[in-house]
């Protein structure tokens, strides 16, 4: 005479396996659907903020601080000790005068001999390279201020340029 008052080991194992499969499905949906959407939204907001702050730099003088290409290659670093006055102005205007980790490897250039301002935003932590194109498209569609933004999926960068600008060295005199 057997007393069947519980579940067999096989039944319990089957319930655990089905539960694990459902849980892994939820994690996959989060990883591949929800998280990239949040990343694009957050990155678009950050880049838009930098472009707005860049626009503010020219509001008084009508020109942007001249900084040659390759001088500011990491807006996330502390550039307050730079001997270049224009670098200090750009850094403090775009970061509020503090180190901002998400600006690591972001670049600013506005050569004195040119008429194009360039900001390169690096998204090396993007879940996939295609997201940079979505970020560039969001900026293009939602930030109407004569900026042209393109994504590079290989380097995971968004390059935003503004043409027909005046890049001028700031004088403290």
Image (tube, rainbow, N blue to C red):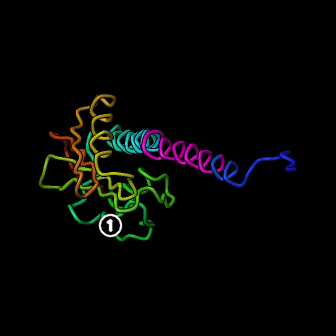
| Left or right placement of residue 125 versus residue 137 in this view | right
Q: Quadrant of the C terminus?
A: bottom left
Name the one closer to the observer, 117 or 74: 74
- Neighbor class of circle 1 (other Cα within 10 Å; few <14, some 14-19, many 20+) is some
- Magenta stretch: includes residue 98: no
Residue 172 in sight from this viewpoint: no
Name the one closer to the observer, 170 or 96: 96
Residue that sits furthest to the front in the current view: 1
Q: Magenta part mainly helix, strand or loop?
A: helix
Q: Residue at x 30, y 58 (%)?
A: 107
Residue that sits furthest to the left in the current view: 113
Rendering coords of residue 28 (x, y %): 48, 46
- The image shows residue 171, relative to residue 151, as above or below, that is below
Name the one closer to the observer, 68 or 10: 10
Residue 143 in sight from this viewpoint: yes
- The image shows residue 77, relative to residue 115, as above or below, that is below
Q: Which secondary structure, mark 1?
A: loop
Rendering coords of residue 35 (x, y %): 47, 44
Rendering coords of residue 166 (x, y %): 19, 44
Residues drawn in magenta: 15-34
Q: Where does label 1 land, which residue?
A: 84
Rendering coords of residue 122 (x, y %): 32, 56
Q: Residue at x 20, y 61 (%)?
A: 69
Number of marks in the rendered image: 1
Name the one closer to the observer, 38 or 88: 38
């Amino acid at each position: 005479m057997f007393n069947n008052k519980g579940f067999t080991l096989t039944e319990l194992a089957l319930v655990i396996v089905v539960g694990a499969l459902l849980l892994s499905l939820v994690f996959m949906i989060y990883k591949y659907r929800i998280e990239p959407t949040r990343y694009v939204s957050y990155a678009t907001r950050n880049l838009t903020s930098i472009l707005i702050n860049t626009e503010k730099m020219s509001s008084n003088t009508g020109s942007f601080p001249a900084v040659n290409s390759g001088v500011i290659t990491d807006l996330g670093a502390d550039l307050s000790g730079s001997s270049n006055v224009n670098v200090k102005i750009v850094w403090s205007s775009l970061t509020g005068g503090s180190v901002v980790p998400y600006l690591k490897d972001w670049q600013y250039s506005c050569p004195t001999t040119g008429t194009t301002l360039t900001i390169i935003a690096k998204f090396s932590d993007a879940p996939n390279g295609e997201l940079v194109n979505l970020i560039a498209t969001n900026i293009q569609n939602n930030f109407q201020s004569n900026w042209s933004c393109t994504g590079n999926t290989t380097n995971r960068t968004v390059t935003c340029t503004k043409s027909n600008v005046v890049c001028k060295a700031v004088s403290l005199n």
